[in-house]
Image (cartoon, rainbow, N blue to C red):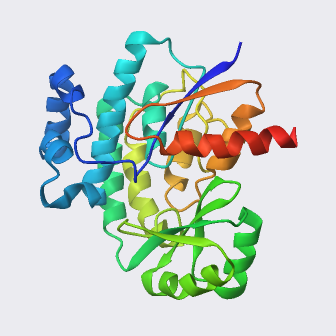
């Protein structure tokens, strides 16, 4: 029998109207979220005033809440999965699903994470399609040393982070290399060296929380290995994700190595499901 894997999306999956129906089904949880956040998260998700869903400070809590409620709905018709993982922000939903944090604790951590990540300016991210991880490392080391690899999403989809001006200079180079360059609408250079100054403050918040050993195995973005059971190891994975690359490709491959898997994306959109389609055929060919 194939293992069941539930995966939770990250920033970029949000859209106006997400959560419609879920907010009405779980009003008490929405009220708890509003009390923790200090703003009306339902209004932001459904009406997107002032284009707030593009602002990290709102985007991350909104996605965390909608994915959490979506998972509650999932459990009404399905048993708990064998494994969970999430992409960037989605990892905190995975930790919640695995019982590492309860909803309130997870949302408090995500709120602080969003505030810190929103505070970094003059940097951004872009997706580059057509190069492998190794090729991208060589390109950046040779031509753009101020730009980091932020996400390894598929065998040929890499996300890079760096100063806005340097990313702009990289456009022509990647196009000359016949690679597709897609600027991302984010507020900072996430998962790069430019997040490192935030780690100490985030670490303090994480260590103040009650954390439990996972009841379901969780794959960490930072290590592409399963989360440990101890609080120190759990906290380090959560904090190191800030300035470490999201090793999504390697995380999925880890699960594929356990045997047959079925992947279900729980939360807004189908971005991760589309990535899985590009990873599985390649990984199968290697085995």
In this picture, residue 172 sits left or right of residue 253? left
Which residue shows up at 33% across the image and 48% down it?
14
* In this view, 100 is above or below 161: above
Q: Is residue 224 visible?
A: no
What residue is rendered at 19% in x and 60% in y? 51
Residue at x-position 20% and y-position 22%: 26
Q: Is residue 174 above or below residue 207?
A: below
Specify whether 217 is left or right of 207: right
- Residue 128 place in picture, x, y as percent: 59, 68
x, y percent for residue 46: 17, 42
Specify whether residue 65 is in view: yes
Q: Quadrant of the C terminus?
A: top right
Front one among 78 and 175: 175
Quarter where residue 228 is shown: top right
Looking at the image, residue 198 sits to the left or right of residue 7; the answer is left
Quarter holding the N terminus?
top right
- Residue 285 locus on image (x, y percent): 84, 41
Residue 211 location in percent, x, y?
45, 32
Image point 36% across, 71% down: which residue?
120
Q: Nearer the viewer, residue 140 or 241?
A: 140
Nearest to the observer: residue 181 or residue 31: 181
Residue 258 appears left or right of 32: right
Q: Is residue 168 above or below residue 243?
A: below
Number of callouts in the render? 0
């Amino acid at each position: 029998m194939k293992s069941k894997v539930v995966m939770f999306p990250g920033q970029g999956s949000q859209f106006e109207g997400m959560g419609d129906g879920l907010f009405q089904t779980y009003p008490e949880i929405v009220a708890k979220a509003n009390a923790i956040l200090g703003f009306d998260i339902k209004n932001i998700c459904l009406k997107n005033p002032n284009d707030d869903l593009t602002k990290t400070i709102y985007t991350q809590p909104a996605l965390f809440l909608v994915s959490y409620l979506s998972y509650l709905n999932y459990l009404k018709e399905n048993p708990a999965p064998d494994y969970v993982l999430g992409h960037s922000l989605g990892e905190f939903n995975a930790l919640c699903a695995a019982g590492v944090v309860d909803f309130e604790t997870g949302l408090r951590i995500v709120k602080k994470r969003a505030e810190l990540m929103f505070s970094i300016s003059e940097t951004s991210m872009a997706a580059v399609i057509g190069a492998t991880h190794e090729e991208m490392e060589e390109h950046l080391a040779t031509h753009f040393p101020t730009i980091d690899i932020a996400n390894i999403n598929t065998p040929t989809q890499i996300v890079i982070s760096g100063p806005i001006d340097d990313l702009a200079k990289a456009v022509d180079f990647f196009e000359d290399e016949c690679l597709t360059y897609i600027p991302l609408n984010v507020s900072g250079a996430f998962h790069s060296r430019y997040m490192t100054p935030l780690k100490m403050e985030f670490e303090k918040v994480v260590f103040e929380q009650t954390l439990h050993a996972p009841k379901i195995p969780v794959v960490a973005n930072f290590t592409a290995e399963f989360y440990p059971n101890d609080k120190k190891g759990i906290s380090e994975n959560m904090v190191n994700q800030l300035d470490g690359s999201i090793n999504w490709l390697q995380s999925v491959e880890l699960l594929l190595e356990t045997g047959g898997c079925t992947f279900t994306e729980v939360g807004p959109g189908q971005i991760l499901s589309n990535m899985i389609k590009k990873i599985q055929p390649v990984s199968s060919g290697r085995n």
